[in-house]
Image: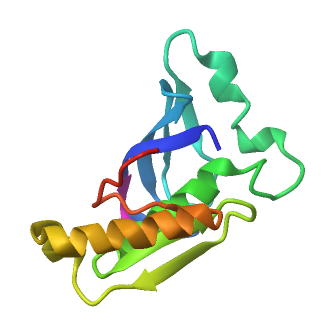
Amino acid sequence: MDLVLKKVKIHEDMSEETTCFSAEMWEKGVHIADVKNDGRGGCHDIRPTKGNEKAAWKYNENLSLEWNRENFPIDHLLGEWDAVTRHQAKKLVLVENATGKVFTIPLKHSITNIKKTPKLLTQVIGIAQRQKDQGFTVINRNITLPTN
C-alpha cells in the first residue's frame, strides 16, 4: 500500500463510537492531507494539502459502497498502527503482505534492550529478514531494519 499515516495521535479518552485521532496522510512519500476523526461515529475529516485535493479525495469513505481494506485504507492503517503501539515492546509486529493480517512474534527482551545489545539486534534483524523472505513486513516503529 502506498498510503501511510504519520504523526498519529489517538485520543482513547475521547473515542466513543469510532476512534478519535489525528494524523498526517502520506501517499508515495508526499504529504497529501491531514486526517482526523472526532470519535463520535462520523466519517473521517480529510483536509488535503495544497495541490493534493485529487489524491486525497479518493480516500473519502463516503464514496465507497463496500467495506474493505482497499476502500477504507485509513481504518486499516489505524488498526495496524494500534497493533504496533500496543505490542511492540517485546514483540515484532508483522503484516502479511498478501492478506494484510497482523501477526506478532514474541521476543525475550524489549526492543529498547535489544537495541542496546548488538548481538541481540543482529538476531532480531535476522528473524525479520526471514519473515520478509516469507512475505511479511515488520511494522514496528521502534526499530529500524536495513532495507535491501
Left or right: residue 75 versus residue 148 is: right
Q: Position of residue 123 (x, y in %)?
A: 31, 74
Q: Position of residue 131 (x, y in %)?
A: 54, 69
Extreme-right residue of the structure? 65
Extreme-left residue of the structure? 116
Q: Position of residue 32 (x, y in %)?
A: 53, 24
Left or right: residue 117 versus residue 77 is: left
Left or right: residue 132 versus residue 89 is: right
Left or right: residue 5 versus residue 10 is: right
Q: Residue at x 10, y 68 (%)?
A: 116
Residues shaded magenta: 9-13
Q: Residue at x 84, y 44 (%)?
A: 64
Quarter of the image with the N terminus in it: top right
Extreme-bottom residue of the structure? 108
On whether residue 12 falls in the magenta region, the answer is: yes
Residue 27, compared with residue 51, is above or below; it is: below
On whether residue 118 falls in the magenta region, the answer is: no
Q: Residue at x 39, y 65 (%)?
A: 14
Q: Nearer the viewer, residue 21 or 87?
A: 87
Q: Nearer the viewer, residue 124 or 102?
A: 124
Q: Position of residue 88 (x, y in %)?
A: 34, 73
- The quadrant holding residue 91 is bottom left
Tally of numbered tags: 0
Q: Can you see residue 48?
A: yes
Colour scheme employed for the rendering of this structure: rainbow
Residue 87, compared with residue 145, is above or below; it is: below
Q: Residue at x 59, y 39 (%)?
A: 3
Q: Can you see residue 79?
A: no
Q: Nearer the viewer, residue 104 or 58?
A: 104
